[in-house]
Image (cartoon, rainbow, N blue to C red):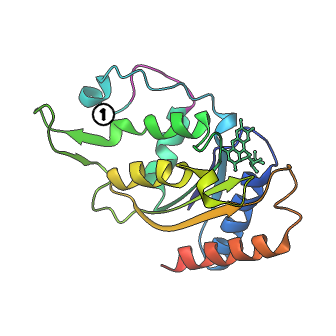
Amino acid sequence: MLGISGSPRAGGNTDTLLAALLDGAASAGAQTEAVYLRDYAIAPCTGCERCRRDLTCTRVLDGMHLLYPKVEAADALILGSPTYNYNITPEMKAFIDRLYPYYRFSAERPGPYSSAFAGLGKAALVFSVAEQKDPAERGFAIPAMQRPLEALGIAVTSVFPAEGYFAKGAVAADPAILDRAREAGTRFALQ
Ligand SMILES: Cc1cc2nc3c(=O)[nH]c(=O)nc-3n(C[C@H](O)[C@H](O)[C@H](O)COP(=O)(O)O)c2cc1C
């Protein structure tokens, strides 16, 4: 199971929740690894469409190429992002856009598409962290991760929005949310 933090803030709420989710999954027997997108220097997709021909990104040879093998090998993914302006962070958006080489497009415009991941049984849990408690204030953070993963043939079987956490140590200071995250991680691993 590969856990992916999209927070630029090291040791913040997203990292803490990711650790708790993976902890819960590990207690159910999953082999887990956490990666932090801020450590990888991932350039935005340029839309050159070369990946349609090359089946990987040959336009930008950056840290994303260290993550492609991990994404391919993982049977389960956890993606988490702080809410930034009702949405995910630029780090998480760049990561998701750079999964574009896994789409398999037909020649028609517009036309049907499929994914190299379709039918492989990959599953994902997505989570977000927000300062505000009103779910409206997290905006698109969850669907911004959920919908592209589903389009890529990865079943999003769990979502875990965490609301009411602002300061860097806020999640770490709340044993209740950490317990809920561990339980969610365990349930996800057992699915
Ligand atoms: C640029 C920026 C934009 C933010 N936008 C929102 C927002 O739209 N809604 C919200 O509830 N919280 C918002 N927040 C608060 C963060 O989501 C919150 O502090 C979160 O716990 C940060 O997670 P981290 O510790 O992993 O960085 C924003 C924070 C920053 C820095």
Q: Nearer the viewer, residue 18 or 57?
A: 18
Asked if residue 80 can be seen in this view, the reply is no
Which kind of residue does numbered mark 1 sit on? Answer: Leu
Q: Is residue 133 above or below residue 5?
A: below
Residue 90, position in %: x, y? 59, 33
Extreme residue in the left direction = 108
Q: Is residue 174 magenta?
A: no
Q: Is residue 93 above or below residue 83?
A: above
Q: Quadrant of the N terminus?
A: bottom right
Q: Nearer the viewer, residue 27 or 160?
A: 160
Q: Residue at x 36, y 32 (%)?
A: 56
Q: Residue at x 53, y 80 (%)?
A: 190
Q: Quadrant of residue 103?
A: top left
Q: Quadrant of ligand 1?
A: top right
Residue 136, position in %: x, y? 59, 55
Q: Residue at x 80, y 49 (%)?
A: 12
| Residue receiving disc 1 | 55
Q: Which residues are magenta?
A: 57-63
Q: Is 158 situated left or right of 18 in this image?
A: left
